[in-house]
Amino acid sequence: MKNIIEKARKSTTISTVLEPLVRDLIEKHKISTGQEVRFHKIEGSEVFFYFVNPER
């Protein structure tokens, strides 16, 4: 996850572009690793994501 965020930060300095860029990097990570992404909402509006290996 840190790697995805670091790539996004290096790719742009405009925060409005960051969201689509992070989404694109998440999709690339899913394709290259086979992992699934999970989103979790905490404390109202804070949302974070993490990757898991798919259940078989």
Image: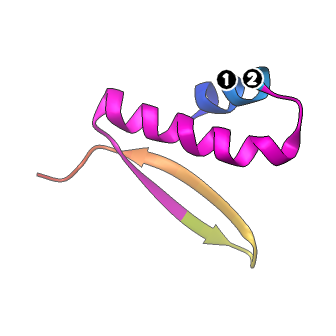
Three-letter amino acid code at the position of disc 1:
Lys
Instruction: Residue under label 2, please give it.
Output: 11
Circles 1, 2 touching at the beta carbon (< 8 Å): yes
Circle 1 sits in a helix, a strand or a loop, which is it? helix
Q: Is residue 38 magenta?
A: yes
- Name the outermost residue toward the left: 56
Q: Is residue 7 magenta?
A: no
Three-letter amino acid code at the position of disc 2:
Ser
Residue found 60% across the figure and 25% down from its top = 3
Residue found 33% across the figure and 34% down from its top = 31
How many other residues sit within 10 Å of disc 1, few (<14), some (14-19) or many (≥20)?
few
Instruction: Residue under label 1, please give it.
Output: 7
Circle 2 sits in a helix, a strand or a loop, which is it? helix
The x, y position of residue 46, in whole percent, is: 74, 66
Give, as a single range, the part of the protein colored magenta: 12-39
**21 on left or right of 56:** right
Q: Is the residue 20 above or below the residue 11 in the image? A: below
Q: Is the residue 13 above or below the residue 49 in the image? A: above
